[in-house]
Image (cartoon, rainbow, N blue to C red):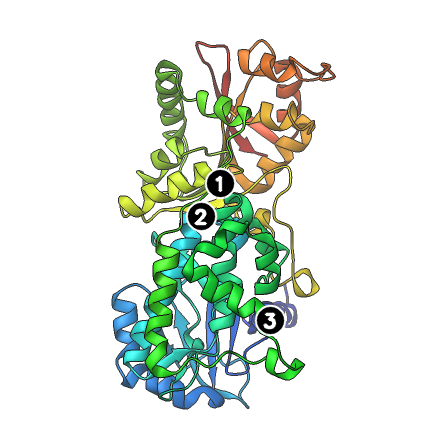
Amino acid sequence: MDAGKVLCRQGFQYIQKEIMNQPERIAASYKDPDSVVFKAGNLIYRQVNHSYLPNYRLLHQSGLYDILTQKQLLLSHQEVSTPVFDEHTHYTTILPEQLLVITYPHEWSFRQWKDAALHLLEILEISLRHEMILKDATPVNMQMHKGKMVWIDTASFTSHEKNSPWIAYRQFCECFLAPLLLMHYNYADAGKLFQQYPNGISMKQLSCMLPFKARFNVHVLMHVYLQASFKGTTKTQQQTPALKQKKLSAIIDSLKTCIGKLEPRYIHFDWDLYYQSLWTSESYLEEKTIAVGRFLKDISVKTAVDIGCNTGHFTRMLAAQEIRVIAADSSSSAIDELYAHICKNNERHIYTCIQDLSNPTPNEGLLLKERASFFTRAKSDLVLAVALIHHLCIAKNIPIASFLQSLAILGDYAITEFVPKTDSNVQLMLKNRKDIFANYTQTYFETEIKELFDIMQQHTLENGRILYLLRKK
């Protein structure tokens, strides 16, 4: 190859590299003029703009940043000289601790919502002692990190003048208190409403949705019904109610007391009882655990997604090997139980997520780029899908090929389980409906597997179910 072609190729490779390292704004970062979150290379940065300089200095000089990061309430960061997103507005660039997984509020269980709300109120109390306050209160700025719910928006803190109101009070009530009250009084799955109401549920809407007995809770009466009944001009209705300094602590205490006493209202259906009964056979679970453990010895993975994780038996098995696991299930009560385990045991490798594989979170928001789909966020080295195929292919009529395509999108390796029609649980599913599933056989399943995967191992369990270890082609 002549020198000219070599130089041309090197130049092209250099240009490619430069393009790949060009700062790219994160699609969700467009609302706050004080900072911008962007990606350069494989890292996420935040540019702090000149407009935020006084508050950024106060955040650090007051000692607030140190206290919040020590308590693991705020995502820590370090200042770096480059990259720069916009040199005209740039003051400094910070490199935050990198989040391993992103989840959205409508994918949280009740306890995640509750912890996020109480942590925000704790951040608010500490901030006030350092003459600062939060200027927004959206749950989107909370993420699960190393087993805890942490605040990720460094530019949310602003100086607080004595006797001035908390401008984010109404937003907190609409975005945190409203979903929590609906999960307490109505149904624990009500947190999913945040997908349809990403800016929160107004107090007037909420007052119509809550049962009559909610009026007898003094905290609900004050924070919901009082706001809902407020009347005035269009201009005054849009203003935040004044919260004087002498009353602000009492308001925060009231919110903490109200939220602290809330518990989820689960409505258990007959199918839920069946679903839990899958795990009652100790011999079945023990045999499957041994087989999965043997499969794991044949592959090397650092990340995994466990779809249909239930209360997390295999999720915990993966996490014990220091594998980062996204644990997803359509049952909010199962995810809540797993999240409680994470908190109790200080588990740092598990990230819980309410997700129905037949209707997963799609790309959403501004230009369909503001919030990424579950399939984009959950891609991992390994996908685990055991005791799941019949729930999708029989109960929800999803084709076997589509089920396997989902696995191929999510992971390079897959551990899955085929549950034959002779299985008592499948028979229960077919009891009151016509069997239209002629292709639901082991032979057809394996034929479809070979279109996407190589079968590395398989193991037939005592009850007739078959476990597979698959490698994507």
Q: CA distance from mark 1 to mark 2?
A: 8 Å
At label 1, the amino acid type is Ser
Q: CA distance from mark 3 to mark 2?
A: 42 Å
The image shows residue 445 at horizontal and vertical percentages of: 63, 20
Q: Nearer the viewer, residue 269 or 139?
A: 269
Secondary-structure class at tag 2: helix
> Which residue is labeled 1 in the image?
332
Q: Earlier in the sequence, mark 1 or mark 2?
A: 2
Is any atom of residue 75 visible in this view? Answer: no
CB contact under 8 Å: marks 1 and 3: no
Please identify the quarter of the rendering in which residue 259 is found: bottom left
> Which residue is labeled 3 in the image?
19
Judged left or right of residue 417, residue 126 is left
Q: Which mark is residue 66?
A: none
The image shows residue 205 at horizontal and vertical percentages of: 62, 60
At label 3, the amino acid type is Ile
The image shows residue 76 at horizontal and vertical percentages of: 34, 69
CB contact under 8 Å: marks 3 and 2: no
Q: CA distance from mark 1 to mark 3?
A: 42 Å
Crowding at dot 1, Cα within 10 Å, few <14 / some 14-19 / many 20+, comes out as many
